Image: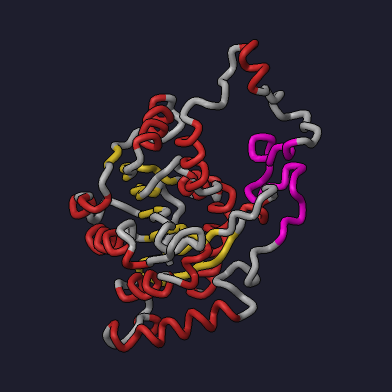
């Protein structure tokens, strides 16, 4: 059984604002990011600012995942994480899958093979379950990783929105009996059929039901990691604010008080937040999938 009791050196692909690593840390795992890989200029500037403020690990930022020199990190990395581009699988797009130029999974798989991390933790949109997920699971298992996956939502952790995401956990040391057999050509139909059966069953991955669970308490400090003011969800717009919240400042008030006007880099910030992973959701996914994986291995 793989242990995560010690500090885990990790590489973060498609880092965004670092939501996945924040979630893993919330789950109690001591992860240390040694490399970030992020192509978006505004995201990189955000990462640099956080690093300079001491809020993120001091790590270099590579900007091209396709040319990332993965081989130099072989044997030095415990975990590899990433929320690779969702556009090839998102229902909001054209769902071109592997034909989409933003399809980065083949490159990530190359890097997994070159680095051989002890574990991998990936995130993508819900649409991934009907396009591309079977190939990711098949590739990881073919490369010797035991896999678990599931659908998880921000609503499950008390957020006022759903934001359903697919999370995949892989751990090195896949038993031979669990590895796919035969060539890829012979496995495609079988893998798609098996995945379809899993989607139609009452259990989607390890998330207890096909639809992510409804939150039992939207606020009041609900937190799967213990609970504190810093981890509560704020009141919805129009609701009375909680005592622990900072007073909200409107745009008109900001002109008088000198606060941020909310317009600077607005589009870039919306993209950053829209593509980012909710740390609480990543925390729930990690805890659930890691527990399931260890239970199955006992």
240 with respect to 116 (left or right): right
Magenta segment: 214-237
- Give the left or right position of residue 295, taking residue 12 as reference: right
Q: Is residue 144 above or below residue 155?
A: below
- Measuring 56% from the left and 52% from the top, which residue is drawn there? 283
Q: Main secondary structure of the magenta part?
A: loop
User: Residue 85 magenta-drawn?
Assistant: no
Name the side, left or right, on which 79 lies relative to 110. right
Q: Residue 78: x, y in percent?
A: 35, 54
User: What percent of the width, then of the height, locates residue 231?
Assistant: 64, 40
Numbered label tally: 0
**Can you give x and y, in whole percent of width and height, for residue 249 in the image?**
67, 22
Front-most of residues 288 and 111: 111
Q: Residue, x 39% and y 25% (percent of image)?
A: 52
Quadrant of the image for the N terminus? bottom left
Indicate left or right for 208 with 217 as reference: left
User: Can the viewer see residue 10?
Assistant: no
């Amino acid at each position: 059984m793989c242990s995560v009791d010690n500090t885990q050196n990790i590489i973060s692909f498609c880092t965004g604002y670092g939501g996945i690593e924040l979630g893993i840390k919330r789950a109690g795992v001591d992860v240390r990011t040694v490399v970030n890989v992020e192509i978006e200029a505004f995201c990189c500037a955000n990462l640099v600012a956080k690093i300079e403020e001491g809020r993120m690990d001091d790590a270099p930022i590579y900007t091209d995942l396709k040319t990332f020199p993965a081989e130099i990190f072989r044997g030095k990395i415990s975990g590899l994480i990433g929320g690779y581009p969702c556009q090839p699988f998102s229902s909001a797009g054209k769902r071109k899958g592997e034909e989409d130029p933003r399809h980065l999974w083949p490159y990530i798989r190359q890097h997994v093979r070159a680095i051989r991390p002890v574990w991998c933790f990936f995130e993508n949109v819900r649409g991934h379950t009907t396009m591309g997920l079977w190939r990711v699971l098949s590739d990881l298992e073919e490369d010797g990783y035991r896999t678990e996956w599931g659908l998880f939502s921000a609503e499950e952790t008390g957020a006022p929105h759903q934001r359903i995401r697919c999370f995949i956990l892989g751990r090195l040391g896949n038993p031979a009996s669990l590895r796919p057999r035969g060539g890829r050509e012979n496995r495609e139909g079988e893998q798609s059929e098996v995945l379809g059966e899993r989607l139609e069953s009452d259990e989607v991955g390890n998330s207890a039901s096909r639809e992510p669970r409804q939150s039992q308490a939207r606020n009041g400090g609900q937190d799967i990691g213990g609970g504190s003011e810093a981890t509560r969800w704020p009141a919805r717009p129009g609701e009375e604010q909680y005592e622990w919240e900072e007073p909200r400042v409107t745009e008109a008030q900001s002109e008088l008080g000198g606060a941020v006007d909310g317009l600077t880099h607005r589009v870039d910030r919306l993209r950053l937040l829209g593509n980012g992973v909710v740390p609480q959701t990543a925390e729930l996914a990690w805890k659930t999938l890691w527990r399931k994986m260890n239970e199955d291995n006992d």
